[in-house]
Image: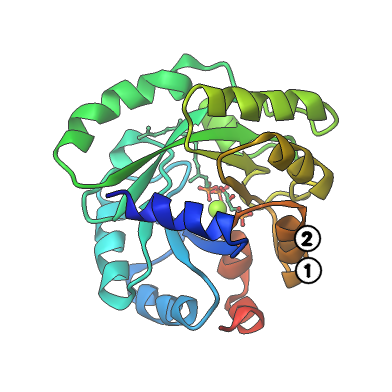
Amino acid sequence: MSSIYQNIITSSLKSKKLLAVLIDPDKMSLENAASFISKVNSSVATQIFVGGSEVDEGITEALVIEIKRYTNLPVILFPGDVIQITDKADGILFLSLISGRNPDYLIGKHVEAVSKLKSTNLEIISTGYILIENGKQTSVERVSQTKPIKRSTIQTIVDTAKAGELLGAKLIYLEAGSGATHPIEPEIIAKVKKELDVPLIVGGGIRSSSELESAYKAGADLVVIGTAFEDNEDFFNELKK
Ligand SMILES: CC(C)=CCC/C(C)=C/CC/C(C)=C/CC/C(C)=C/COP(=O)(O)OP(=O)(O)O
Ligand SMILES: O=P(O)(O)OC[C@@H](O)CO
Ligand SMILES: [Mg+2]
């Protein structure tokens, strides 16, 4: 039973908006996890994503174990690489970077991941991951050595998202990049949402309740926020349950 995905689908059908807090294992120490997670628990957050573009081996697993001690929210891996896979999480976004043309990030890492995934009970959720230009180079762009899609070429963004869905992606993720200068514009979100039958995730550079609301209003089913919480944990106060 695919409970994480079922929950996203059900929420999307009921227009109940979801919020994932992204925890980057590079930036969260094990000592700070308990107090950070207590703030997540008191907020409207519905999921915890764990991942980074570049994370050393072993760190993710230790952090996931610590996070799971303090929360009942689903913990979902959002991995930049195969070494971030751990069976201590509940699920994994099986990302294919479909905005780029680097075979390693389209299919190569996935082949490598299979033997690791086989020995886990992770719920594996196929996700079409689309990087969109935001005004500065992002970690994903650097690590994957791919170019983001230009913000101005909206039809290409829409067609890329739809192609991902037609290839079987269960989710589409529009990514401006961690710490992006410009979050994904509402016009882009709305046009992609209109064409899609699967739920839409939006993330990158969202730093305020009003930016969060405008992403939801445009059609995002699930919004991901990381940097804004890393920079200022008081932001959780604006997002209390
Ligand atoms: C299939 C498996 C196991 C892995 C997929 C590998 C792919 C295709 C990854 C997509 C490209 C990529 C590098 C994604 C990383 C996504 C992510 C966790 C971004 C968050 O980045 P941060 O590490 O927060 O960036 P900063 O360090 O700049 O804040
Ligand atoms: O860190 P921020 O800018 O919130 O971005 C979240 C996520 O979409 C990055 O992969
Ligand atoms: Mg980050």
The number of discs equals: 2
- Please name the residue that numbered disc 2 is placed on: 214
- Mark 1 near mark 2, Cβ–Cβ under 8 Å? yes
Tell me which corner region of the image, top left, top right, bottom left or bottom right, holds residue 130: top right
Q: Amino acid at mark 2?
A: Ser
- Is 24 in front, or is 221? 221
Q: In the rendered view, does 85 fall on the left or right side of 172?
A: left
Q: Which mark is residue 37?
A: none
Q: Which mark is residue 210?
A: 1
Q: In the rendered view, does 170 fall on the left or right side of 193?
A: left
Q: Position of residue 114 (x, y in %)?
A: 24, 28
- Is 103 in front, or is 212? 212
Q: Position of residue 125 (x, y in %)?
A: 39, 41
At mark 2, the secondary structure is helix
Which residue: 60% across, 38% down? Answer: 197
* Residue 135 seen in the figure: no
Q: Is mark 1 within 8 Å of ligand 2?
A: no
Q: Label 1 crowding class (10 Å Cα cut-off): few <14, some 14-19, many 20+? A: few
* Residue 167 seen in the figure: yes
Which residue: 83% across, 44% down? Answer: 187
Q: Amino acid at mark 1?
A: Ser
Q: In the rendered view, does 237 fall on the left or right side of 77?
A: right
At mark 1, the secondary structure is helix
- Is 74 in front, or is 55? 74
Q: Position of residue 172 (x, y in %)?
A: 57, 38
Which residue: 61% across, 54% down? Answer: 221
Which residue: 78% across, 38% down? Answer: 191
C-alpha separation, residue under disc 1 versus residue under disc 2:
6 Å
Q: Relative to 82, is 237 above or below?
A: below
Q: Position of residue 128 (x, y in %)?
A: 53, 32
Q: Check the image and tell me how it is coloured.
A: rainbow
Q: Label 2 crowding class (10 Å Cα cut-off): few <14, some 14-19, many 20+? A: some
